[in-house]
Image (tube, helix red, strand yellow):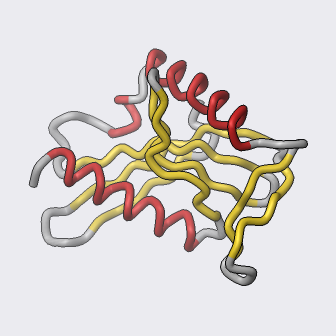
Amino acid sequence: MKRSRIGSLGEDIAERFLEQHGYRVIARNYVIARGEIDLAAYRRGTVAIVEVKTRSGSSYGRPAEAVDCEKQDRLRNTAAAFLRVHKRDGRIPVYSRLLRRQRPRPVRRLRFDIIEVYLDGKGGHTVNHIPNAF
């Protein structure tokens, strides 16, 4: 499987995982000139900026180890840009399935998470969510 396909599959799995755990995904693959956010999710006043790392084998070590200091700095800067664009009066738009529209929700906290997705090669996977990873 191509690397881009593995990454996209990992993001699909991570998005479903977050939604099953009460998060609302508010952005996916948010890109600016100097960085990208894989997923931004909202839950109970917290915006989680999520870096998704997917592995189909163990030869490269733990996926979270790939999020070095340089990557963390890029994520912080991209998250600040994301909030500058989307946050108004301490609130951020979150899509409500019930109302079928976006509804501004309060933002009290920003957090950086990593989700490791391990593909087993047989169509299965394992997810490891690391809240407050850095």
Q: Position of residue 123 (x, y in %)?
A: 19, 72
Which quadrant holds the N terminus? bottom left
* Count of residue discs: 0
Residue 88 versus residue 47: which sits nearer the camera?
88
Q: Which residue is pictured at 38% across the width and 55% down the height? A: 11
- Residue 88's image quarter? top right
In the image, residue 131 sits, relative to residue 15, either above or below, namely above
Residue drawn at point x = 56 percent, y = 73 percent: 20
Q: Nearer the viewer, residue 34 or 53?
A: 34
Q: Is residue 15 left or right of residue 47?
A: left
| Residue found farthest to the top | 70
Q: Residue at x 70, y 47 (%)?
A: 47
Q: Quadrant of residue 103?
A: bottom right
For this orientation, the residue located farthest to the right is 89
Residue 12 x, y percent position in the rendering: 37, 62
**Where is 50 relative to 74, above or below?**
below
Q: Please, which residue is most extreme toward the left here?
A: 1
- Residue for point 60% across, 69% down: 21
Q: Quadrant of the C terminus?
A: top right
Residue 51 place in picture, x, y as percent: 47, 41
Apparent side of residue 27 relative to residue 31 in the rendered image (left or right): right
